[in-house]
Amino acid sequence: MLHCHDERVHPAVLVVAGVAGSGKTSVGLLVASDLGWPFADGDSFHTSASVAKMRSGAPLTDADRQPWLRAIAGWIGEREAAGGCGVVACSALKRVYRDRLRHGHPTVRFAFLTAPAAVLHGRLRGRQQHFVPASLLASQLADLERLGPDEPGGLVDASGPAEQTAAAVRALVEQPA
């Protein structure tokens, strides 16, 4: 297990990002468990109004996402202020969202999970009791802005099993920033 202050570990807070069905929560939980870091599921930071909106099949607007992004950025700030590490699962679809999460938080790195649309659709159809229906995938893919070369982190193929993806994310954590 790598510890937060292990010289091989570079991010203090890792954001496991990607569209619905990419495996953010499953992979984030595995990585956090392996590293011994606290984990937060970005879905738990949504307002009840946003959850209801998504449950009804309506995509969120940028304005809907602002309180959610503020809450996640607050969680990141708490980790940094305590000198600790953490893993948070968060779609972070647009550059402006990622910039919001990074603003004032220099230790943030992204592991951006990618998978073919057919894989994502299959996963979403198989989900039980999640408030994001498969019908919202198209809007998420339309909003998706890939991680830029100047953004900290990297892309991770998430088309295989969660354990395989988590291993690739852990390797990313050990890469020089």
Image (cartoon, rainbow, N blue to C red):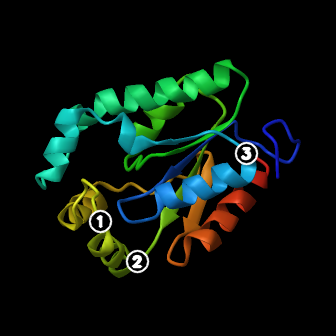
The one of 167 and 92 positioned closer to us in this rendering: 167
How many neighbours does mark 3 have within 10 angstroms: few (below 14), some (14-19), or many (20 or more)?
some
> Is tag 2's residue or tag 1's residue first in the polypeptide sequence?
2
Q: Position of residue 159 (x, y in %)?
A: 50, 77
Report the side of 83 relative to 94 (left or right): right
Q: Quadrant of residue 49?
A: top left
Report the side of 98 relative to 104 (left or right): left
Q: Amino acid at mark 3?
A: Gly
Residue 111 visible here: yes
In the picture of the structure, the residue carrying the numbered disc 2 is 116
> Is tag 3's residue or tag 1's residue first in the polypeptide sequence?
3
Q: Amino acid at mark 1?
A: Gln
Give the CA separation, mark 3 to mark 1: 28 Å
The one of 13 and 139 positioned closer to us in this rendering: 13
Q: Are marks 2 and 3 in contact (CB under 8 Å)?
A: no
Which quadrant does the C terminus fall into? top right
Label 3: state its secondary structure: loop
Label 1: state its secondary structure: loop
Q: Residue at x 82, y 42 (%)?
A: 3
Q: Viewer-nearest of labels 2 and 3?
A: 3
Q: Position of residue 165 (x, y in %)?
A: 60, 68
How many neighbours does mark 2 have within 10 angstroms: few (below 14), some (14-19), or many (20 or more)?
few
Residue 128, label in figure: 1
Q: Amino acid at mark 2?
A: Pro
In the picture of the structure, the residue carrying the numbered disc 3 is 36
Q: Residue at x 80, y 45 (%)?
A: 9
Q: Residue at x 32, y 68 (%)?
A: 127
Q: Residue furthest front?
A: 129
Q: Quadrant of residue 53?
A: top left
Q: Are marks 3 and 1 in contact (CB under 8 Å)?
A: no
